[in-house]
Image: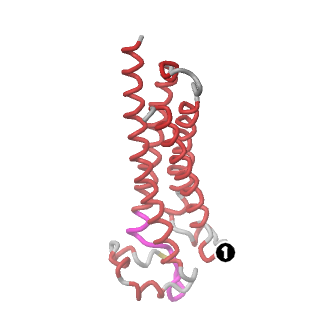
Amino acid sequence: MNPKKYTRSVGLSLITLSLVCIGANALLLVPDGKTWSSEQLSLQVLLMPGFIGGGLMVLCPGITAVWSGHHGRGQPYSAHLPHPVQITCSCWCSVFGMLGAIYCLSVSGVGLRIGPKCSMYGTWDYHFQETLGTYLNNYASWNFCEEPPNVVSWNVTLFSLLVVASCLEIVLCGLHLVNTFILYFVNMYRL
C-alpha cells in the first residue's frame, strides 16, 4: 500500500474517533437529556476527557495525517516523499495525540471505577466509589440513584465508549508515528 494513502486513512480514522469522543463528552454533560449544575456532575465529566484529550488533542494528528496523505497526489511515487519539516511536525502531532488519548483513557477509566455522582436518599455524592468498580456487575444497584435518572447506565455507556475510542486512538497515533519514521528513513536514503 502507498504510505501516503495509509497515512490519509489513519488520519481520517483519527478525525472520526476524535469527533466520537467530543460527542460522547457532550452527552456526559447532559445526563437524562437535562442540564445539571457542576456540583451535580462528577469530576471526571468536568475534566472533559473526550473533548480535550480524545477530541481536540487527537484532531491535530488526524488533520496533519490527512493533509500529508493528500499532499503529492497525481505525482510520481518519489514525489510522495514528505519534506523533513513535515515529518518532524507529523511526529510531534502524533506524540501530542497519543498524550491526549492517554489522558482520555486515564480519566475515563477512573470515571468508570468511581462511578457517577448522583443523588441517593437526597444526598449528592459518589455512592459507588467504595465498591472499587464492582458496581459495574451489580445492575440492581444502578437504580438506587434517584437523580439524574439512569445516570449509571448513561455514564457506564459513554465512559466505556471513551475508553474504547481512546485505546484505538493510541494505537492509530502509534501506527502513524511508526509510518512517519519509515517515511523519514526512506526519504533520507533517497536523497
Residue visible at 49% across and 32% down? 4
Which sits in the foreground, 18 or 31?
18
Name the spot of residue 27 as percent of width and height, x first.
60, 66
Which sits in the foreground, 49 or 114?
49
Residue visible at 48% across and 71% down? 157
For residue 120: magenta? yes
Which sits in the foreground, 1 or 86?
1
The residue positioned farthest toward the top in the image shown: 191
The boundaries of the magenta stretch are: 110-124
- Which residue carries the number 1 mark? 34
Tag 1: residue type? Answer: Lys
Label 1: which secondary element: loop
Instruction: Check the image and report above or below for 39 versus 70.
Output: below
Name the spot of residue 113 as percent of width and height, x first.
38, 68
- Label 1 CA crowd tier, 10 Å (few <14, some 14–19, many 20+): few
Quadrant including the N terminus: top left
Name the spot of residue 34 as percent of width and height, x first.
66, 75
Residue visible at 40% across and 23% down? 184
Q: Is residue 80 left or right of residue 181?
A: right
For residue 48: magenta? no
Residue visible at 40% across and 63% down? 110
Name the spot of residue 151 as percent of width and height, x first.
53, 77
Quadrant including the C terminus: top left
